[in-house]
Image (spheres, rainbow, N blue to C red):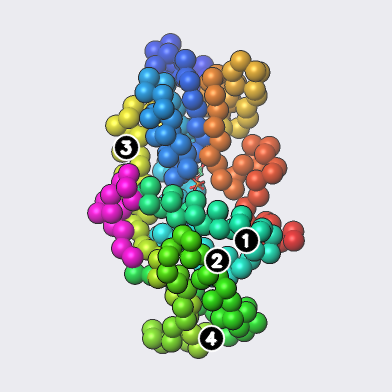
């Protein structure tokens, strides 16, 4: 199918006078669209998604409502100041509270069973480093959580080939990611946000007054473009965004 397959009515209804186009219907794209709807009640908002379903991390993740394990926080501290890391964790935590508020704990099946970080027998150095820094990180995070976030726990689940203790984050929760994404999609649809699936954006060009968008099926123009493609951004020529695994390989 190409542009010529679209009728006058199809083009007029779905692809003309678009105020905001968002590429990607993951948690970021959908949340962004909903926020735009709150700010601009009358705007025409369109989301383009390459997959039949949202085809990224948002529907394929592990379902932890997390804001950073101890080893992740220590890793962040290698490249950021304490104040920056604290701000980042505060934002992540506030984001989780907002998500729960907007969708409701029952709908996303939120429970707070805590999260455990396990270290394999090969991770002895990292494990010992993490254990020795529990107190330091707890006091860093005190302004946000008001009590200790991390503590060590015996291997009560009897996992094999791991270090003797886990590190428990008592503030970590669990959600049903599928239900969360479905609820976000439903909210978007109820807010008159159009979502076109099976539609891959291949290129875009900003001509100052509008943005020309090319997809694998049609071309159209939008007033504003927002890109919420996560690690796929480089496929649209945005080299600054790199998936975490790429960063690790190159560093
Ligand atoms: C295996 C795994 C487990 C994870 N576990 C957790 C966890 O337990 N807890 C947690 O908090 N986080 C977890 N994460 C991270 C979390 O899932 C992501 O940070 C989050 O989902 C990113 O959301 P997003 O909307 O930015 O990106 P995505 O969900 O990746 O959405 C990007 C969307 O853009 C679409 N797209 C890309 N390119 C184009 C294009 N050219 N045209 C049209 N559409 C396009 C994709 O199909 C996709 O739907 C995990 C990630 C992975 C990969």
The answer to which of marks 1 and 2 sits earlier in the sequence is: 1
Instruction: Report helix, strand or loop for mark 2.
Output: helix
Along the line of sight, the residue nearer the viewer: 202 or 141: 141
Q: Which residue is mark 3?
A: 187
Residue visible at 50% across and 88% down in the picture: 164
- Hey, which quadrant is residue 202 in on the image? top right
Instruction: Report helix, strand or loop for mark 4.
Output: loop
The answer to which of marks 3 and 2 sits earlier in the sequence is: 2
Residue 163's label in the rendered image is 4
Residues under numbered marks 3 and 1 in contact, where contact means CB atoms less than 8 Å apart: no
Left or right placement of residue 178 versus residue 56 in this view: left
| Residue 104 is inside the magenta segment | yes
Along the line of sight, the residue nearer the viewer: 97 or 122: 97
Quick one: which residue is furthest to the left in this view?
106
Q: Which residue is mark 1?
A: 82
Between circles 4 and 2, the one closer to the viewer is: 2
Residues rendered magenta in the picture: 100-112
Task: Give how far apart the Cα atoms at labels 1 and 2 are.
Answer: 8 Å
Q: Quadrant of the C terminus?
A: bottom right
Residue visible at 35% across and 34% down in the picture: 188
């Amino acid at each position: 199918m190409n542009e010529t397959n679209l009728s006058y009515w199809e083009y007029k209804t779905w692809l003309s006078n678009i105020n905001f186009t968002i590429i990607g219907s993951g948690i970021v794209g959908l949340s962004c669209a909903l926020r735009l709807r709150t700010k601009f009640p009358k705007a025409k908002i369109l989301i383009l998604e390459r997959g039949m379903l949202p085809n990224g991390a948002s529907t394929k993740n592990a379902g932890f409502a997390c804001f950073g394990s101890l080893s992740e926080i220590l890793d962040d501290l290698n490249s950021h100041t304490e104040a920056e890391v604290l701000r980042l964790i505060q934002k992540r935590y506030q984001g989780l509270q907002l998500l729960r508020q907007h969708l409701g704990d029952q709908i996303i099946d939120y429970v707070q069973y805590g999260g455990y970080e396990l270290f394999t027998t090969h991770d002895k150095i990292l494990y010992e480093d993490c254990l020795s820094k529990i107190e330091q990180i707890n006091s860093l995070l005190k302004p946000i959580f008001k009590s200790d976030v991390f503590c060590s726990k015996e291997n009560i689940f009897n996992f094999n080939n791991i270090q003797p203790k886990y590190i428990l984050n008592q503030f970590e929760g669990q959600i049903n990611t599928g239900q969360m994404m479905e609820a976000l999609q439903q909210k978007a649809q109820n807010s008159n946000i159009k979502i076109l699936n099976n539609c891959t954006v291949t290129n875009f060009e900003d001509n100052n007054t509008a943005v020309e968008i090319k997809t694998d099926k049609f071309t159209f123009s939008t007033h504003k473009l927002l890109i919420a493609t996560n690690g796929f951004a480089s496929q649209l020529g945005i080299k600054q965004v790199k998936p975490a695994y790429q960063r690790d390989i190159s560093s």
